[in-house]
Structure formats: C-alpha cells, structure tokens
Amino acid sequence: MISDQTKTNGFILSSVSLGFNTLACFISCIIFLIIIYHLCYNHVKHEDKITIVLCSHIYLTILMYSSILLSMNIRSMLGYLAIVLLSMLYMSFLNQAFYRLIRIVYSQNRRFQSVKLYAILPFLEIIILTCILLCVLIPLNGVTYLPNDHFCYPTFTNIPGVVSTGVVAYVCPFSCILFIYTRITRFIHQQGNIPTLIIKQRQSRDLLVIRRILIIVSLLLILAIPGMTLILMFIITGEENPLLARIALFPVSASQAGLSVALLFSIPQLKNIVLNFQKTSTVTPVNRVVQGALQMRTITGTQ
C-alpha cells in the first residue's frame, strides 16, 4: 500500500516534470520550425545543410519524446486538472456576473471595464484555484486511482476531500454569483421610476439575461445532486456504489452539451455573432456568383 507521503512526493515530481517537458516541447518545436524554414527559404552550403538536417532530427526526436512524457504527466494529474477546470467553469460565470455588476451598478468605474482585465483574469484565477485546490487535496489524499473506472479522480468516499472541493469549486462561486445578481436586480428595481424609454428597455433586457444565466447556473448546481445522494448513502450504509464516479460525472458531461447550446440563446451578443456568421457565410457565395456574372457581361459587352 502506497503511503500518503509517497503519493504527495509523486505528485510533486509529476508537476515538476510537467513543467520541464512543456518547456522542452516549446523550445524544440520553435527551433525545429526555424530549421525547416531556414532550409526551405535560405541558401545553405552542402556541409552545413547536413549538420542542420541532423540537428533537426535531434530536435524532432526531443519534441516527440517530450510530448509523450508530457502526456504521461498530464494523465497522472488529470484528476486534479478536472476539478480545477470544473471550478473554472463556475468562475467564468462569476466573472460574467462581476462584469454585469460593474456595467450596471457601478458604470462610472471604467477601470473594471477593460477588455485586458477580463482577458487576463481567467489565467490569474486558474493559478489561484490550482494553488488552493491542490494544496487542499494533496494532504487529504483527495485524488486517487479509481480501480473500477481506470482513471484518477477525487475519491467520493473521502469525505474531507469532497467537502473541501465542494466548498471551493461549488459553494463559494455560486454564493458570489447569487449575491451579485441579487444586488443587480435590486438596483434595477430601484431605478424603475426613471421615465427614459431607452433605459427601461436596457433594464428589461438585462433582467431577462440575468434570469437565463441564473437558471443555467442553478442547473449546474443541481447536477451534483446524484453524486451527493450516493455519497450520503455511503455515509449511512458504509457501502460504496461501484458506479459512483460514473453516475456523478454523467450529468456533468450531459450539461456540457446543453450548456453550449443554452448560452447561445441566453446571451444576445453571442447569438448575434453566430447568426451574422451564418448570414455572411451564405450570402458571400451568392455575391461572388453575381459579381462574376456582372464581370462576364462587362467583358462580353466590351468585346
């Protein structure tokens, strides 16, 4: 039986190896592409060409071998990464709620309405979440290999690990989202006496979008009910369902497909982008045919 300290040391080694292999893949890929470009577009002496070709073989081998090692490191850490990315899903909704709070309630604050801020924010959050989640799960031995499922994932029967993960990944983001949208809704209702038609239309549109997003976030929270039910049954009976992980992950997997469609109809800006793309992709070939026909008429007319 592997001890907890050995598992912790193994995770640390995998993390460090992941960084080294990523760096090796990045450097070798860039140098290999530079070599290929140099051989194709520059004049190289015969003796130098042989040396460069041999170097390209070395870098290509480094790239392929580092990629395989990188895949092995990632596979050993997939359980941790899955939890981090799941929490990032809720954090993305939290970022969206924060932006709407600034745009509607604190519209005069321009510092928090920068595109650069919201482009960098997810990367900062994933670093913070990685540090928090991994620091909590490692001493609790929260992620282990599941022999019935043949992959690594947080052990649902590890109650301290499940509770800590649930608080960080589910409870905290959902509570912040609920608080922010409650604040926005109260602010809009307080501004309801403003007679301007444009403001009323904008407020009604914001309320509609907020309701739709809250429904989506609530559904994401409800999806954890099957897994929580089986965990409670384990606590009461002491018997673990062999399909616990698959039952808990099935609604989450189904939600990803539904979420990709639901967001399209919930956010007007996203819906307009997709619809306009379809229009341009269908109209453009027709325009080209019409322009070609007009050009042919012009050519035949001049002749």
Image (cartoon, grey):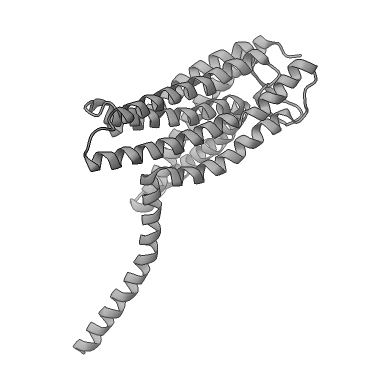
Find residue 207 and report its image quarter.
top left
Q: Residue at x 44, y 43 (%)?
A: 266
User: Considering depth in this image, is 277 or 40 the residue closer to the camera?
Assistant: 277
Q: How many marks overall?
A: 0
Is residue 244 placed above or below 137 in the rendered structure?
below
Is residue 109 placed above or below 276 in the rendered structure?
above
Measured as percent of width and height from the top left, residue 2 is found at: 73, 14
Is residue 225 placed above or below 131 in the rendered structure?
below
Find residue 187 and report its image quarter.
top left
Say whether residue 302 is left or right of residue 159.
Answer: left
Q: Can residue 46 be seen in the rendering of this structure? A: yes
Measured as percent of width and height from the top left, residue 203 is found at: 31, 37
Q: Residue at x 76, y 29 (%)?
A: 148
User: Considering depth in this image, is 74 or 283 the residue closer to the camera?
Assistant: 283
Measured as percent of width and height from the top left, residue 300 is found at: 25, 88
Residue furthest out toward the left: 302
Q: Residue at x 57, y 39 (%)?
A: 255
Say whether residue 126 is left or right of residue 71.
Answer: left
Measured as percent of width and height from the top left, residue 90 is found at: 49, 29
Q: Can residue 10 be seen in the rendering of this structure? A: no
